[in-house]
Amino acid sequence: MSVCLAVEAYNSASESYRSDFCPTGYNRNHRISMEFQKKAWSTAVAFADGTHMEEDPLVYFGDYKRKKSPDVSHESDVKPGQEDSDELHFVFTTSCEPHQDWQSEALAQSFARVGQRGALTRIVSGCSDDAVKELLRRMHKSSPHLRIHVTRDFRSLPAYKKVSDEVEKATTADEYAPYNKPFGLRDWLESANPPVLEELVVVLDPDFLFMRRFAVNTGGRVTSPRNVDSGNYAHDAEVIEGMRQYKPFFVYTGPRENVSDTVTDGVAVAQRWSNYLGTTAFENSSSICPECAKVSKADATEYFAVGSPYVITRNDLMQLMDDYCNMTVLKREQTNRELRMSEMLGYLLAAAKHGVKHTTFDNLALGNKVDDYTDFVSIMKGNPCKDPISPMISGEVPPLLHGYHSYEADDDRNFKWVFNKSLMPNNLFTCDSWLLAPPPASVWTRAKQSLNKQRMLEAYGVCTSIKVLNQALVDFKTKMCPDGFNQNRRLRLVKDVHQDLLKVGQVYTRWQHVAQENAYQGA
């Protein structure tokens, strides 16, 4: 008992000291073993020389019991895709590479945190048997709600070339990772266990994060960007936690009237990408899709210039899958394997051939693209960077974050803050890795004072992305690190600097420098 009391007293004194002198947090991992007649550690710093964690430590797994879902009345009039409906299956495809592994974990944690209804599946392609076993073991503990579907690696499919009226295999393979998306989806639809039974499918990318629940078929307000701030608070707004905000709505930029968020056979919903894609899918495509030649430029822009998330009926997706796969390959070959977005164009051509038109909205996901609805930053109440822990997610904000582009903003000390998925170390989810450093409140106040909407968007994006990812990290480590984990919010990303691993005790010099700089300035 005296040993236990001594250890408890030591830990208590240590934590009391650190709470006073570690403003960004500290490592709460209780892992120093004081075994009798065993070699003592030379230091208590994780990954430092002289510790048994110096070389690639294991992630320790803890017991995790899935929380019971709150009781929800299942009324007979709940439509597929609505917030209280489980007839919605979210799916995304990945390789077995480390960066897609941590992105998948972050997506799954954010899905659970917002209480998203429906199923979630990760299709993973190209893993070794050992990697699959480790993935399943980890996900069973960290994300029991996430289904895993394993396929072969499709990225090296044989190329195809047109010969008269037939298609024959060429002699060289095409190394194109996006092939995993259409071919992986087809394999999943055909052989998933349990089978895919939900009426609606939402196709995501692994670099998505949930900020709030995603829903369609709601019959909610559809408005143009300029009419979002309607001023009709009695009808369009609600008060949540003492703050008035607009109820969730859909932003539509187009010529049609009577647009809704309805998803049914023949009608899908997706994020608008018209400024990026335009009519590209239908240019020089008559040999690939003769039926697509009937699509006018106006209809191509209105119904088929879209990107993820795609919300489509399971029936429609199954009908177009073969053409989605084949047209992706043919479009890739038509462009001499130089067009990175051949997969996107293959999907759009297949949808057009099968008569699946998309209702395009600007605010399904926030990805810092020109097509995105961003005016919410002008009507936002409060400072989204003030709270270092909780993100400000009001009804005006899209439900999803898409890590397609980076965010950059400066604080009042002229320190630069960056959020960019390509700059992240791949071992963020280990128990001893730092959390991300949250930007100070001045990032928003400075952007707000500029009256520049893009600067305000960058400020909102960098603060919110960091905090949402930190929430995913904390949720994961709370389950997976039974001895505690490093709660030091100190990792400040540096533009154009990427390191695969974050080793506390052997921190990359640039990261260490900006972390100390930030701490000294009292961020």
Image (cartoon, grey):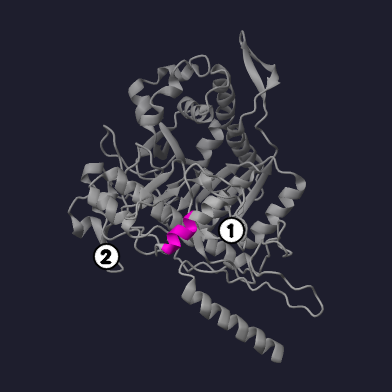
Task: Give the answer, above or below, for where 266 lies relative to 366.
Answer: above
Where residue 136 sits, quadrant-wise, is bottom right
The image shows residue 255 at horizontal and vertical percentages of: 26, 32
Please tell me how crowded label 1 is: few (under 14), some (14-19), or many (20+) other residues with Cα within 10 Å.
Answer: some
Mark drawn on residue 12: none
The image shows residue 332 at horizontal and vertical percentages of: 56, 22
The residue closer to the viewer here, 287 or 53, is 53
Mark drawn on residue 243: 2
Q: Amino acid at mark 2?
A: Met
The image shows residue 14 at horizontal and vertical percentages of: 57, 79
* Residue that appears at 42% across and 55% down: 211
Q: Which residue is mark 1?
A: 145
Task: Give the answer, above or below, for where 174 lies relative to 71.
Answer: above
The residue closer to the viewer here, 78 or 326, is 326
Where residue 167 sits, quadrant-wise, is top right
Q: Residue furthest left?
A: 231
The residue closer to the viewer here, 369 or 82, is 369
* Residue that appears at 39% across and 30% down: 276
Of helix, strand and loop, which one carries label 2? Answer: strand
Task: Give the answer, above or below, for where 64 lies relative to 112.
Answer: below
Q: Amino acid at mark 1?
A: His
Task: Give the answer, above or below, for where 486 lies relative to 317.
Answer: below
The image shows residue 446 at horizontal and vertical percentages of: 28, 53
Q: Going by the image, does 207 lie left or right of 213?
A: right
Q: Quadrant of the N terminus?
A: bottom right
> Which residues fall within the magenta stretch?
514-520
Of helix, strand and loop, which one carries label 1? Answer: loop
Q: Going by the image, does 181 lie left or right of 232?
A: right
Is residue 112 among the parts visible in the rendering? no
CB of mark 2 within 8 Å of CB of mark 1? no
Q: Quadrant of the C terminus?
A: bottom left
